[in-house]
Image (tube, rainbow, N blue to C red):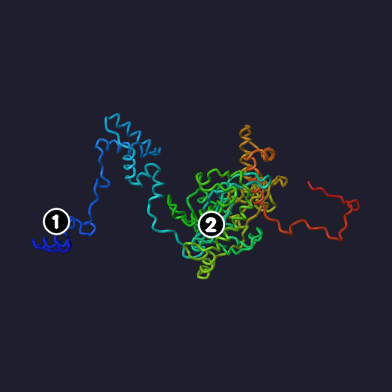
Amino acid sequence: MIRRLVSLAHPSRSDFLRACRELGLRRTRLYELLRAYREDPVTSSLLPQPAGTRRGSRRLPDETEAVIAEAVRDFYETRQKPSINQLLKEIRRLCRVRGVRAPSWHAVKARVAALEPAELTGARHGPKAARDRFRPVPGQYEAECVFGVVQIDHTLADIIVVDRQYRKPLQRPWLTLAIDVASRMIAGFYLTLEAPSTISVALAIQHCVQPKEAWLAGLGISAEWPVSGFPDAIHLDNAKEFRSRTLKRGAQEYGIELIHRPAATPHYGGHIERLIGTMMGAIHLLPGTTFSDIDERGDYDSAARAAMTLDELERWLALEITRYHADRHGALGIPPLSAWCEAVARRVRPVRQPQDLAGFMIDFLPSVDRLVRRDGIHLFGFRYWDDVLSIWAGRLDRSLRVSYDPRDLSTIFVRGPNGAQWPIRFADLRRPPITLGEHRRARAALRERGLALVDEQLIFETIEAQRALVDDAVRRTKAARQLAEKRSRALDAATPNRSPAAAEPLQADDDRPIDWSKVPIFPVEEWS
């Protein structure tokens, strides 16, 4: 009825009377409805307006409103992040000084609730927090084929592990994960007690590249994990270890593109972040978990309940990953393992497979350039020698690339002029393997003693003394157990696994003990 009257160019008096009679309204009320509809020509404009003060209106005096606005701007929107109660105290102080009526707590809270959330977060928590929380992220990072893009990131695992010897709590380990963006398959991982470094990245990439069958068999796991080979690109954040010269050189050597996400854009790493959240959610069910935050942990004593060593946690993670591969993925609608198999069948070019895993690992180790002197190669204050250096000693006029493993400094790897890699050991083969961390601590101890110029013997004597102190304190202090566990694991991991053929041969049944007294002694010619 109202819409028809408004549509008439010149409605007559009889039109208004007929409308009033049919609607049961007075003419004044009909005119109010017509005016409301002309201002906003929608049906809901004819609804009766609620009684009372309109929502959002303010009834405080202008002077009080000015004091609230000033206190919010100068006191509340600061990085100290005061509470609303503290804001109310500041407003009441200003009102008392200026002789203005103070507002109530509810009035102040209503003014704070009406502030722009993004601007308030930026003022109290910084622009990065405001961007992460409120900036729109319409798209996500995608890959067209398997191993087209692999994302890698670190996280501090939400669990405390125990040492292997006394099974006492040590610390939370670091977990490096790699995920194939296209299929959501976990490409590899690395678990360590050390903070993220170039070695963590190199070992995670090595696990991503290598076939998993032998590794799973070594853990006693019978499962399918077909991911191996060189990815076309690796997607990383901007951490220091992801921008190292070592990683860039290794990626160039094997034709792997490094893609760093734009600064302050964590949503570009959404796949790996969600995977980390999934893995941590599973870890929260293990003994010794620290959960995600203090509120969730409550009075749960993580250190007292810690029960798993790093090796046991690594095997558990391998089992959890194989279960994750076989479970339906929410975004894909199918298990990641099925998505991988289907995508591999569609891939135009097969995934490039490694030919020399040992050489691949060396190319991702930290390296320096060194000249081959007549007495060998000098690095970290140590002298390295092997007969292969004889052809270059004092004759090569350029430096060679020397790679080293921080977990074991007893062997370095020299790349010859023809590109071949040669392992070179300590010149003094009696020297025990040591880690780079032990070397740095020994040098620092010697500097504190005022010994600026040190030799190999002094360094090794200091390391042996420090090891003895650590071993003596291991039963008493957590820090000593952490140090001993890190040293033990680093040296164990850096030592290549010996094959059964390389082990000492067993004595045959028909072998008889040798009577050395009957072995003739021949004269030996001495050469000076």
Find residue 356 and report its image quarter. Answer: bottom right
Secondary element at tag 2: strand
Q: Which residue carries the number 1 mark?
A: 26
Marking on residue 178: 2
Number of other residues with Cα within 10 Å of mark 2, as a class: few under 14, some 14 to 19, many 20 or more: many
Amino acid type, residue under disc 2 in the picture? Ala
Q: Residue 374, can we see it? A: no
**Depth check: 287 or 420 in front?**
287
Please state the horizontal and vertical placement of residue 438, each as a whole percent of the image.
63, 42
Amino acid type, residue under disc 1 in the picture? Arg
Left or right of 8: which side holds 81? Answer: right
Left or right of 75: which side holds 334? Answer: right
Find residue 8 and report its image quarter. Answer: bottom left
Q: Residue 331, can we see it? A: yes
Above or below residue 98? Residue 46 is below
Task: Name which of mark 1 and mark 2 comes first in the sequence.
Answer: 1
Residue at image x 61%, y 57%? 359
